[in-house]
Amino acid sequence: MDLATPLDIICRIIVRSREVEAQVPGIDPDNDDPVDDSDDERDVLEDELDETAVDELRTAIDDLAEDQQIELLALALVGQGTYDASEWEDALEEAGDDGAEPAIDLLMDMPTLSENLEAGLAAFDLSCEGVGQID
């Protein structure tokens, strides 16, 4: 399987998605028990610095051609176990389904995007090790 998306771009997207996934629960100074939401208010994520990471991630994915976004989504589908490597064409078909939500939205809504992309790469014996500044 040859990827249309350069590996270094996929690896940059993985790094950006890790930054987004690293958001931590906010602390409500008026709530002694952050798990207890009985006051019908919820603590929000601390996102002052992470808004930039979200914007950068969205931009990095949005800058890809449509077929590359579809390929990225298919790679994430393989990585999350919806398909295995031998079902690559099926994963591409689902990712490119015209009736589905756009690939960029599905990718941005994926809570473990970096993990899914890394596992997807690993399914094809690819990794970000030694690519750019990624360890």
Image (cartoon, helix red, strand yellow):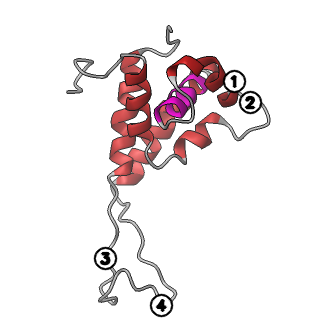
Q: Which residue is mark 2?
A: 97
Residue 63 visible to the viewer = no
Callout in the foreground (4, 1): 1
Question: Mark 4: few, some, or many residues within 10 Å (few <14, many ≥20)?
Answer: few
Name the amino acid type tagged 4.
Answer: Ser
Q: Residue at x 27, y 18 (%)?
A: 131
Q: Residue at x 68, y 37 (%)?
A: 102
Residue 88 relative to residue 15: left or right: right
CA distance separating discs 4 and 1 = 44 Å
Residue 93 has which mark?
A: 1
N-terminal of the pair, mark 1 or mark 3, is: 3
* Main SS category, magenta section: helix
CA distance separating discs 3 and 2 = 41 Å
Is residue 129 highlighted in magenta?
no
Q: Which residue is mark 3?
A: 27
Question: Mark 3: few, some, or many residues within 10 Å (few <14, many ≥20)?
Answer: some
N-terminal of the pair, mark 2 or mark 4, is: 4
Q: For residue 112, what is the image quadrant?
A: top left
Question: Mark 2: few, some, or many residues within 10 Å (few <14, many ≥20)?
Answer: few
Circle 1: element type: helix
Residue 41 visible to the viewer = yes
N-terminal of the pair, mark 4 or mark 1, is: 4
Q: Residue at x 29, y 85 (%)?
A: 29
Residue 71 relative to residue 93: left or right: left
Q: For residue 37, what is the image quadrant?
A: bottom left
Above or below — where is 90 with respect to 49? above
Residue 67 has which mark?
A: none
Highlighted range, magenta: 70-79
Q: Could you tell me residue 80's position as x and y percent?
A: 48, 38
CA distance separating discs 1 and 3 = 43 Å
Question: Mark 1: few, some, or many residues within 10 Å (few <14, many ≥20)?
Answer: some
Q: Which residue is mark 4?
A: 38
